[in-house]
Image: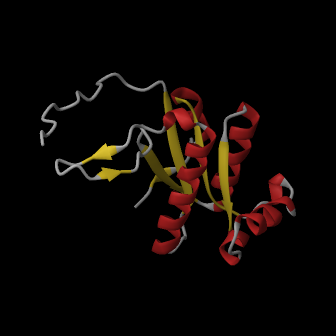
Amino acid sequence: MSRVTAVQTIPTERPATKIVVVLRDDLAPWQVANVTAYLAAGVAADVPELVGEPYADADGNSYLPTLGLPVIVRAADAATLAGCRSRASARGLPTAIYTAAMFGTGNDRDNRAVVAAERADALDLVGLAVHGPRNAVDKVVKGTGAHP
């Protein structure tokens, strides 16, 4: 049994796009983890070419692929988060959202129903993810801070 010993070179070129998750700054730690995972999965589902190749360790065990771009996590108050959603929409950038009501559901159908019941400007957002050209995403998340 031969083992692969080559190490793949990591590109040093900066990617043309970026993924940013913005979370409301009052979430519990379990909510931070849950919402971030949910939103990152939304980006991966929308843009499958962002998903890299599967992993394998030196023993031959296989692991699922992950996003090929870093996911930057930011924090904001509710008003700033709503502004991010509005700017992303105005720029036509792909956006995943998570609302407070979604914490009370247990399935995707009910998640979509609670979102569909609210107008865009009335959504009680707890998080969003946006993907797009670096400069455009930076403008969308302007005013957010580093997540603690």
Q: Is residue 114 above or below residue 44?
A: below
Of residue 74 and residue 16, the one placed in the foreground of this image is 16
Q: What residue do we see at 58% from left, 54% from top? A: 39
The answer to whether residue 138 is left or right of residue 53 is: right
Circle count:
0
Q: Is residue 84 visible?
A: no
- Quadrant of residue 136 in the image? top right
Q: Position of residue 13 (x, y in %)?
A: 34, 22
Quadrant containing the C terminus is bottom left
Q: Position of residue 16 (x, y in %)?
A: 48, 24
What colour scheme governs how the chains and residues are painted in the rendered image of this protein? secondary structure
Q: What residue do we see at 46% from left, 51% from top? A: 73
The answer to whether residue 147 is left or right of residue 109 is: left
The answer to whether residue 105 is left or right of residue 66 is: right
- Quadrant of residue 54 in the image? top left
The answer to whether residue 35 is left or right of residue 100 is: left
Q: What residue do we see at 44% from left, 46% from top? A: 72
Q: What residue do we see at 44% from left, 57% from top? A: 147
- Quadrant of residue 45 in the image? top right
Of residue 107 and residue 60, the one placed in the foreground of this image is 60
Q: Is residue 83 above or below residue 100?
A: above
Q: Is residue 101 above or below residue 91?
A: below
Q: Position of residue 110 (x, y in %)?
A: 77, 69
Q: Is residue 66 visible?
A: yes
Q: Position of residue 2 (x, y in %)?
A: 12, 39
Of residue 59 and residue 18, the one placed in the foreground of this image is 59
Quadrant containing the N terminus is top left
What is the residue that sits farthest to the front in this orientation? 1
Q: Is residue 105 above or below residue 98?
A: below
